[in-house]
Every structure is written in structure tokens, then in C-alpha cells.
Amino acid sequence: MTSPMTRRVRTAAAAGLIALGAAAAALAQQSPPAAPQQVAATNEAEISIQSFQFVPAILTVKAGTAVTWLNRDEEPHNVVSLERVFRSKAIDGGEKFTAVFDKPGTYNYICAVHPHMRGTIIVQ
């Protein structure tokens, strides 16, 4: 037989665990989603420039892949490698820019016109 004090302690502990679980679930829902990532299956891949974002933001390709950026926005954008490997001119809406990635490595890039736009090409 358990005492009233023991039952209260057990009830309080159970309530605390339930609250902790609810808080963890809420925190998990608030975490930002992972950046979209795509793996190219052929030697050609496309990145869409839309709503002031590169989609996908992270693209994994095999060496020798031609990656094409297509501007679906009405505003001009460009694609500038932070490692100075490639740089496009201004890409107007509906226009494209293509770069071939021959060497394995990680290539980070931005739109120099809108520097909050960032992307990564991973070449295997």
C-alpha cells in the first residue's frame, strides 16, 4: 500500500514528464527545416532561381556535370562563386547560365545583387 505522499510525488513526476515531452515536441516543430538538397542523377542538373532563392539550395553532382541556373523571377540575378571559380553576368527573367563542374569539391555561391541568396554545389 502506498502512502498519499508517495502517490502525490508519482503524480507530480508523471505530470512533469508529460510537460517535458510537450515542450520537446513544440521545440521540434519550431526548428527551421533543413535546406532543400538534390542529387543529380545525370551529367546535367538545373537550379531554379525563384522567389529570391536558389532551388535546391544544395545540389550534389558528379564531376563533369553541367549545372544550369534558370531565373524564374522577374528581377535580374547573378551567380557568383565565393571561390572565384565561376561568375555569371546578370541573368534576366527567363534567361539561363551554365557552368561545368569538373573537379570534386564544395562550391559556395551567392547572388551578388541579393547577397542573402546563397547556394552550394557539392561535386563528388
Image (cartoon, grey):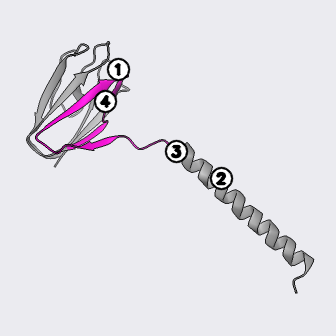
Q: From the viewer's perspective, is residue 41 above or below residue 51?
A: below
Q: Which mark is residue 122?
A: none
What residue does disc 2 label? 23
Dividing the picture into quarters, in which one does residue 44 lie? top left
User: Residue sitting at 29 percent across and 21 percent down?
Assistant: 112
In the rendered structure, which amino acid carries the disc numbered 2?
Ala
Q: Can I make out residue 113 in this image?
A: yes
Query: What residue is drawn where x is 66% and y is 54%?
Result: 22
| Separation of residues labelled 4 and 1 (CA atoms) | 11 Å
Residue found at the very far bottom of the displayed protein: 1
67 w.r.t. 104: above or below: above
Is 31 magenta? The answer is: no
Q: Say whether residue 115 is left or right of residue 85.
A: right
Numbered label attached to residue 54: 4
- Characterize the local packing of mark 1: few (<14), some (14-19) or many (20 or more) Cα atoms within 10 angstroms: few
Determine whether label 4 and label 2 are within 8 Å by CB. Answer: no
Which of the two discs, 1 and 3, labels the residue nearer the N terminus?
A: 3
According to the picture, the residue beneath numbered tag 1 turns out to be: 114
Label whose residue precedes the other's in the sequence (4 or 3): 3
- Residue 79 x, y percent position in the rendering: 23, 25
Is mark 1 in CB contact (under 8 Å) with mark 2?
A: no
* Disc 1 from disc 3: Cα separation: 25 Å
* Residue at screen point 75% across, 67% down: 14
Q: Secondary structure at mark 2?
A: helix
Q: Position of residue 20 (x, y in %)?
A: 67, 58
Q: Which residues are magenta?
A: 32-60
Disc 3 crowd, CA 10 A, few/some/many (<14, 14-19, 20+): few
Residue 38 in magenta? Answer: yes
